[in-house]
């Protein structure tokens, strides 16, 4: 059933619905590589249990998926974007400019970001945000001054870390994981070392807000000398880099790590071991909610779209005893509210 409020985007898709339904009867999904395995599990189960074709689920990263989502309405555009971060205001505007004005935001649960290395490699067992900042940032604070990052080994700034060359593989900028990595780890490390205050003192801008934004941007700029290598692919590419670099440290989603413990070992962050339990309690500091976004104008037009969304957040799928939790997703304690949101087709910005 279409949303009761008929919008321009709804009218646009209705105008082509006669050919749309015939041209495409599969739900199409793209986006976050973190959400990908969960969506793939759901899509396969959906195809086996419903009289609809199995949805097509692709990766590409949160930003790339949302960009495709915001291209417009119609059978040549995707129905759902998976994301490991919230949609940004500029993306909502881009969507609206292309006629995608009705969007349902669905939170599926929580995941953690972990720092892992070769299981037989150096003893990377405990990190603080300051360690990651000192290792990977372009400019760091040394002897009270901001300097181009001089560190070549982890032990150069923390004697408790291995005396091996720094090489790390953070997610590329198109991934939602990158934003959480920057905000909750690199920026936190910048603040902990005192570098943020120095950046703030040196920042230019016509307001305190502008200066703060400039300082934050300086904090999260990573070095470009080959010691920090962005990974634009999914976690399997990061794992391949770790396999080929015995001293490498990779950034992964918790679920991916838990399903590759025969190859990887994980470090604590802030003294806390990452686990579904420590993420559920909020004790582990680097966790984030996971989402998918539904194109409201496609509801009632693309067969199986609402059924897929409802199935995804059902207790038996996304609940604490479901297959997504078994794979590593931390169940959302407010899952019932999410189920109602999907059932009622509640669009973003529609109020309570």
Image (tube, rainbow, N blue to C red):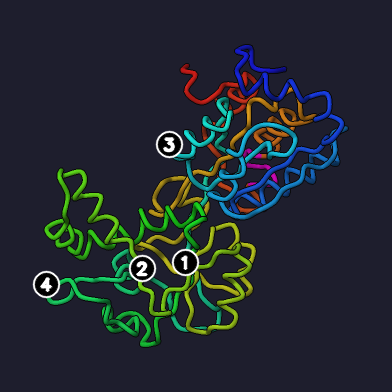
Q: Residues within 10 Å of mark 2 (few under 14, many from 20)?
A: many
Q: CA distance from mark 2 to mark 1?
A: 10 Å
Q: Nearer the viewer, residue 297 or 186?
A: 297
**Picture coordinates of residue 350, whole percent (x, y):** 49, 19
Q: Along the horizontal axis of the image, is 287 left or right of 99?
A: left
Which residue bears the numbered disc 2?
Answer: 222
The reply to whether the magenta stretch includes residue 306 is no
Q: Of the residues under marks 4 and 2, which one precedes in the sequence? A: 4
The N terminus, quarter of image = top right
Identify which residue is drawn at 42% across, 53% down: 180
Residue 323 magenta-highlighted: yes
Q: Is residue 300 left or right of residue 110?
A: right
Query: Which residue is at the front of the view, 286 or 347?
Result: 347
* Circle 1 Cα neighbour tier, 10 Å, few/some/many (<14 / 14–19 / ≥20): many
Tell me how far mark 4 sits from mark 3, CA to CA: 37 Å
* Dot placed on the residue nearer the N-terminal end, 2 or 3: 3
For label 3, the residue is 89
Q: Which of the marked residues, 1 or 4, is nearer the chain's N terminus?
A: 4
* Camera-side residue of 179 and 71: 71
Q: Nearer the viewer, mark 4 or mark 2?
A: 2
Question: How far across and how far down the image is residue 255, in percent?
Answer: 59, 57
Helix, strand or loop at label 2? It is: loop
Q: Which residue is mark 1?
A: 170
Range shown magenta = 318-324
Disc 4 vs disc 3: which is toward the camera?
3
Question: Is the residue marked by circle 4 packed among few (<14), some (14-19), or many (20+) residues within 10 Å?
Answer: few
Do the residues bearing badges 1 and 4 touch, measured as CB atoms within 8 Å?
no
Label 2 and label 3: CA atoms lie apart by 25 Å
Distance of mark 4 from mark 2, alpha carbons? 20 Å
**Cα distance in 3D space between marks 1 and 4:** 27 Å
Distance between mark 1 and mark 3 Cα atoms: 25 Å
Q: Which residue is mark 4?
A: 144
């Amino acid at each position: 059933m279409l949303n009761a409020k008929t919008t321009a985007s709804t009218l646009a898709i209705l105008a082509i619905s006669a050919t749309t339904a015939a041209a495409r009867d599969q739900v199409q999904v793209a986006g976050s590589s973190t959400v990908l395995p969960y969506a793939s599990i759901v899509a396969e189960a959906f195809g086996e249990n419903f009289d609809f074709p199995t949805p097509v689920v692709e990766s590409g990263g949160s930003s790339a998926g949302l960009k495709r989502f915001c291209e417009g309405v119609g059978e040549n555009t995707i129905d759902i974007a998976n994301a490991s971060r919230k949609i940004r205001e500029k993306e909502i505007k881009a969507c609206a400019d292309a006629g995608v004005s009705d969007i349902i935001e669905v939170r599926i649960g929580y995941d953690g970001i972990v720092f892992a290395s070769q299981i037989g490699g150096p003893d990377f067992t405990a990190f603080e945000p300051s360690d990651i900042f000192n290792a990977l940032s372009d400019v760091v604070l040394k002897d009270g001054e901001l300097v181009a990052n001089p560190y070549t080994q982890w032990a150069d700034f923390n004697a408790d870390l291995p005396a091996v060359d720094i090489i790390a593989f953070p997610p590329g900028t198109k991934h939602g994981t990158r934003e959480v990595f920057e905000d909750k780890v690199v920026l936190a490390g910048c603040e902990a070392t005192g570098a943020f205050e120095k950046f703030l003192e040196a920042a230019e801008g016509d307001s305190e807000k502008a200066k703060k934004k400039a300082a934050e941007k300086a904090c999260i700029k990573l070095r470009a000398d080959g010691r920090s290598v962005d990974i634009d692919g999914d976690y399997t590419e990061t794992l391949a880099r770790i396999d080929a670099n015995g001293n490498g440290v990779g950034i992964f989603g918790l679920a991916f790590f838990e399903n590759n413990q025969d190859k990887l070992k994980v470090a604590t962050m802030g003294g806390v071991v990452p686990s579904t339990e420590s993420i559920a309690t909020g004790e582990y500091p680097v966790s984030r909610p996971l989402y998918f976004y539904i194109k409201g104008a496609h509801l009632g037009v693309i067969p199986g779209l609402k059924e897929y969304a409802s199935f995804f957040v059902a207790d038996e799928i996304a609940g604490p005893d479901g297959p997504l939790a078994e794979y590593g997703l931390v169940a959302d304690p407010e899952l019932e509210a999410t189920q109602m949101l999907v059932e009622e087709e509640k669009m973003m910005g529609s109020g309570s």
